[in-house]
Image (cartoon, helix red, strand yellow):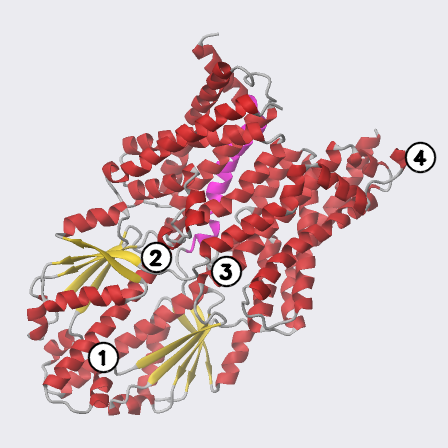
Amino acid sequence: MNFLTLVIQETRAVLSNSYVMLTAIGGIVLYSFLYPLPYAGQVPREQKIAVVNHDRNMVSLKLERMVDATPQVKIAARCATLGQAEDLFLDGEIGGILVIPKNFHKDILLGKSPTLAYAGDASYFLIYGAIAQGISQAQATLAGKVKIMNLIKDGTSPVLAKARYAPIHINAKPCFNPTMGYVHYVVPAVFVLLLHQTLIMAVGLMTSGEGNAAGGAEWISSLKKILIRTLVFSGIYTILTLYCFGWSFDFYNISRLARPLDLLIFLTPFLISASFVGYLTGSLIPRREYVIALVLVSSMPLIFTAGFIWPVESLPPAALWFSSLFPSTCAIQGFLALNQMGTDFQDILGLWHQLWILCLCWGLACLCAGRFCRR
Amino acid sequence: MDQSSQSPSLFPDQMHLIFKDKWLLAFLTWLPLVIGYFIWMVFSQGLVRELPMGIVDLDHSSLSRQIAKTFDASPDLKVTHSFAGPLDAEKALQAGRVYAYAVIPRNLEKETRLHTPPRITLFYNTQYVLIGKKIISAVMRAQATLNARIDIGIALSKGSTDLNQAMGRILPIRSQTTPLFNPGTNYAQFLVSGILPSLWQVFIVAGTVLVLSANHRQGNLAILLKNQAVTNVFSALANVFPIFLIQGLAFLYFFFHHLGWPFQGSWMVLITAQAVMTSICMVIGALFYFLVMDPPRALSLAGVFTAPGFAFMGVTFPKTDMSPLALAWRGMLPVSHYIEVQIGQANYGLAPHLSLVKLVPLAWGILPLMLLILLINRRAKETIK
């Protein structure tokens, strides 16, 4: 049989395999809506706190208003005592407590630097962080105003005072995801893993289901089979990638800075190596349900070692070593750099080479598995 | 003795079944432990430290060097690169070699001395939200330190003698933030105590499907379904229940005993919650199995249901910011209710009734339970035919 007939034959077999099609197409389309669902709000907003104000006067009430005006914080309750606020906290009504000390205003005027106290529930870091950020912004603004007032009192002109409240200013520019939105943070990375996992699953299901009759012993025919399968699946997944990186990114308003050709060049070794991983998984695992189960439980280790949730600099060597065995890690880093940060292809050449090395290693492993692990 | 009349739902039968299949045994025993430990290992450092950043120093003065040193002194930052110009720095930021870079303008020192405050521009990568937040707060703290130092210098040079008075003017308001229940804001404690329960949910639902599949493969299922199908299936499931509960107890032991994370509440309450969670997850797993009667498909359903569990839990992205649709999906996942009990017990030390009330929404589990009973009866009829 010539090569083309084999490819057509394989394509037919893949398209008529309902397990494979359900995993590849059903899985990707379903997850592309399900996974971003909780993050649709993008950033935590208006987290509730209680204020215990022991110094009810103009300045402290102004601070309250400034805190309430930040997008992160909403004052849900004003309590007379700390005890009342604690009760609200334990009831789950609020996530933090701000205490304004007695003589707050007087101490500011006397230059005694009064201390604002904020306590928040660190069981939920995002809520804690949002509230802390809101309060510290309000505090910094008030402190700035006090300094400007002092400068004016000393005889500085109001215009100069406004510039001089700090000796050095910092102008911070957030890059690539300026609003720190969660959809823009999670989706570009998770979609790469989604392609990776469903591809491994799909190739694994295809391979695991068919026994080892065709290509087990003869390694030339085994090689042929691996290559044809990889070719067909890579073709199908190129289309699915277009859906993920094209239509779906558009749907979520995610930036697409990369040139399509660069993406395709980077995609090629990614799809090939992931197909090889799938082939190996399928030929080593006797039952299809175990293929699914293994891919399912491997998702979390892969996602947390890919470097976008937890920086690679903080990973222990063993975790780094494990994660670099799988194409998803390089691919997530590469696609984020290309598509989200607008990197030149030159700068991710290293990752691209790594993916080709993975192709080679996993491909060899597939061949060996076909030869030595006959069932 | 007539083998077929005996119900293979008993504990020894189920254990025999599991031990015969090394893949099944792995999924129920060592694999959850290995993956759980691995996840802990990933975050074991607990804190993000020494994130690489770059400096573009256009001033080359002692003050600009002092600024770079102040950034480097922050435990969260490490100045790894010094760029000749903004273009090089931008490329490094895009390529991910640094997470941030600061451009220190020409004449910085001179302008500071002349009281025309210069402006340092910081570009930082927010594609990785956690890292972006760490950097900006570390830089802001470094700036506050720097400014205070410069201000004190100015105050002293002007002949101010009262340092307290000077401090009052430089820092008119101080603040003190207290992260409750996690004093060191340790990421391992925060993330791992949420990730492992959601991983556990995957293992219970998928594990139940795998156990039923194994029963089917060995021909047990047909016998189970022969007469008194519902009782038989449930007693078979009840005999596997301890395995899943032990998985749950294992991570509790690991967190609150081995690692010594704070635990304020009652073990009984938490273990009750685990038992409820295990039961409902097993019912859901069994429902998936009897719904499609096909192991790979049932497992795919289990995957769709449980895999994004951590995202929906509300431990990271708060549930108060989720849409009604997301909240509905969240409500269906047993782990999102379980985690509230775990946090309530471990952190707040809530009274039992206040904590267990969080499990009330799990009453929806009656629905899959009834469906499961109906389905088992139907499959039993089909088997007899």
SS label for mark 3:
loop
Q: Quadrant of the C terminus of chain B?
A: top right
Of marks 2 and 4, the one in the foreground: 4
Circles 3 and 2 on the same subunit:
yes
- What residue is pinned by disc 1? A145
| CA distance for labels 3 and 4 | 55 Å
Residue shown at 40% from the left, 88% from the top = A54
Look at 58% across and 34% down and name the residue there: A291
Residue under pointer 4 = B1
Question: Which mark is first along the chain, 2 or 3?
Answer: 2
Q: Which residue is drawn at the image coordinates 42% and 39% (left, top)?
A: A328
Label 2: which residue? B131
Is B293 left or right of A239, judged from the image as shown? right
Q: How far apart are the two marked residues, 1 and 2, measured between alpha carbons? A: 30 Å
Magenta stretch in the rendered image: A15-41
Name the kind of residue labelled 2 in the image.
Ile
- Considering only vertical position in the picture, is A53 above or below A264? below
Q: Are marks 4 and 1 in contact (CB under 8 Å)?
A: no
Question: Magenta includes A28?
Answer: yes
Indicate whether A245 appears above or below A20: below
Identify which amino acid the numbered label 4 is placed on.
Met
The image quadrant that residue B360 belongs to is bottom right
Regarding mark 2 in the picture, which secondary structure is present there? helix
